[in-house]
Each structure stands twice: as C-alpha cells, then as structure tokens.
Amino acid sequence: MRLVGLIMLTLFAFMGCSKLPEPNDAIVKVIGDCGSSDIVVSDIKGRKRADGFMQAQVVGENSSGSYQNLEYRVVWLDSEGFAIDTVLSNWNSVPAYPNQPFYINATSPNTKAKTFRLYIKRDKEVICDKQYDGQ
Amino acid sequence: MRQTIRWTIILAALGVLLGGCATKTTNIDINNDKGEAVMGLDYRDFQAAAQDMVESLLASGAVTKKDGGRYVLAVSRVLNDTMQHIDTDQLVKKIRVGLLQSGKVIVTTAVGAEGAEDKMSMQTRKELRGNEEFKQESVATKGTMIAPDLSLSGKILQRNIRVDSSTQRVEYYFQMTLTEIKTGLAYWEDERIIGKQGSNKSVAW
C-alpha cells in the first residue's frame, strides 16, 4: 500500500515537471526547470523617438489567476552590440494582475541605444529572457 | 582534578557553541541582493527611486534641447523631511549620473542652492587672478562660466502609520521638480512612493 502511494507521488511529481506546449503568441524563451511559465510575453516592440532616444514596450500576460509582482531589467545595446553602462539597467518592478495583460515601458539611457535585451524574474528567479533586434 | 577537567570541557563546548552562533561578516552583492527589506531607506530604495526618476525625465522629453545641444543643470535643494539621517546625495548623485549619461544634460558644480558645490571653482578664480605666482594666461578669465538653464529640486517625505498593536506602515515619498530658471516654470515633476510594513519594534529612523 505504501509502495503504491510512493509510485503515485512520483508520477505526480513527474507530471508537474512535464513541459506544457507554449502558446502560439509566446515570443520569449522561458527558462525554468519545471513546467512552463504562467507569465507570457506576447508583444515586444521598440521605436526611435524624434530626439534619438529609443522606447521599448513589452506586453505580457499573467495567466496564473493570482497577482504577481514581477521584476524586470532592460539591458540596452549600442549598434555594435556593446552593453551601455547606465543606471537604468537595474531590476525594476511591474505589477501583473491575474488574467490581465501587463505593460513594461522603458526609455533608453541615451541616443546610442539600438537594441535591448529584457529579463523578467519572479521570486528572484529569471523566467523570461528576450532580445529585441531592431525595427 | 576530575572536577577541573569536567569544567574545562563544559566551558570549551560552550565557547564553540557560542562562537558558531556569531554572525559572520560578509560583503553584500549589490547586483543581486537577496537580503530582506528593512523599515528604513536603504541603497535599494534610492537606486529604485533614482532609476524611476531618470527614466521618467528622459521619457518626458523635458531635457531634450530643440537645437540638439545640452542643458546646463544646477542642483537645488533636496529636502530630507524624514525621521532618518539621510544624505540626499544618495538620490541626487544617481539622478545626476543618469542625466549625464543621457548626453542631454551637463551639471554645473559652480552654482547651487547653498553656494557652489565645488568651492574650488570659484575660489581659485578669485585667489589666482592677479596673483603673480601664477601664469595669468592659465587662470580662468572673467565671463567664462556657463549659467544654468535648469534647476533640480525635491523632497523626501516620511509618514508612519500604526496598523495595530504590533504592526506599522512607513510610507516614503520621493518628489522631484525640474524648473526652467529663465521662466520659473516647472518642466517636469514626478513622485515615487515606497511603502514598507513591519514590526512596531522596528525603528524607521
């Protein structure tokens, strides 16, 4: 009886770790050991403003059914792919309400920014990592 | 004799036990600080507030000059209206660095709300001008300093709220204003709130 219970428990544990198919609109690579994330980035875009600064907008969806306080970090890269040294690349927080889209808006530290790389983490673990490669 | 040995062993064991309990000093990894939040303001709060302020300023377009040049910024007073002993430069310096990195703003240290930030910039001019010990061609002449276009001022406020007999909330408000000196108009303003909740026994000052 105890053995059956143990087998059942092991099966449940493995089922939890099986990777669920990612939604079609997922454009981020989800990094995680166990299962797929309930945080999905559905849109990521950037534009150059008239004054030369770059603006980034990331749209995500929290399908977990519970409020989550996510952290994100944007690393800005110049035209040669070098990371721009800035005070704007520290972790920042964004609220993700249940079953609602969340928006991350960021402005480049200077006019040299060409692309950016976005990281999202929850509970101090990185769950999303995505690079935007120009217009 | 046996009694002495027994006491020695007990004391040695106690020493080892207490030695093991002592908190070891370690360096904080400020790039990945997983430490618990504190009721007072720490560097993480200043970093977050400064980052938000710089981003808000750049996003607003208030520091973009029409002719493509740079604005000259003077740092005015940033008032500490909290119960903590804060050097407001913890916030202002980060904002200054961010604005300087933007390439749109340059900060003057010759003008400030409480006089020149860098006293040498004024002092050397006055003291060296006409001083025979110095080559006068190397001394800054009159009328070479650049006056500021913009002034950055602000305030950090604190509110303590008692939730119940054992819990308290502390709210910190970071308020900043960018004023055009010529017109006296505020081109940009923003506020960031940092809220904390914890034990009544924690002291937020």
Image (cartoon, grey):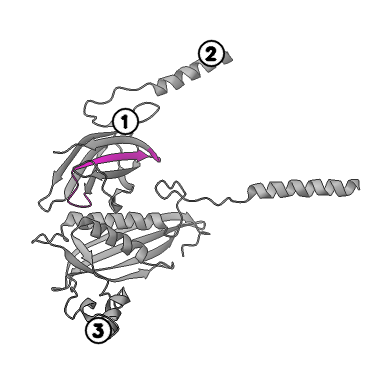
Q: Is residue B85 above or below residue B45?
A: below
Q: Is residue B179 above or below residue A104?
A: below
Using the rendered image, report if marks 1 and 3 lie on a common chain: no
Whether residue A21 sits left or right of residue A132 in the image: it is right
Q: x and y percent of residue A6 in the render?
A: 53, 17
Which span of residues is magenta-colored?
A108-125
Q: x and y percent of residue A64 in the render?
A: 33, 33
Q: x and y percent of residue A97 in the render?
A: 30, 41
| Residue receiving disc 1 | A30
What residue lies at 21% left-to-right and 68% top-to-bottom?
A: B73
* Callout 3 secondary element: loop
- Determine which quarter of the picture holds residue A36: top left
The amino acid marked with disc number 1 is Val
The amino acid marked with disc number 2 is Val
What residue lies at 12% left-to-right and 62% top-to-bottom?
A: B69
Q: Is residue B104 above or below residue B148?
A: above
* Callout 2 secondary element: helix
The amino acid marked with disc number 3 is Arg
| Mark sitting on residue A4 | 2
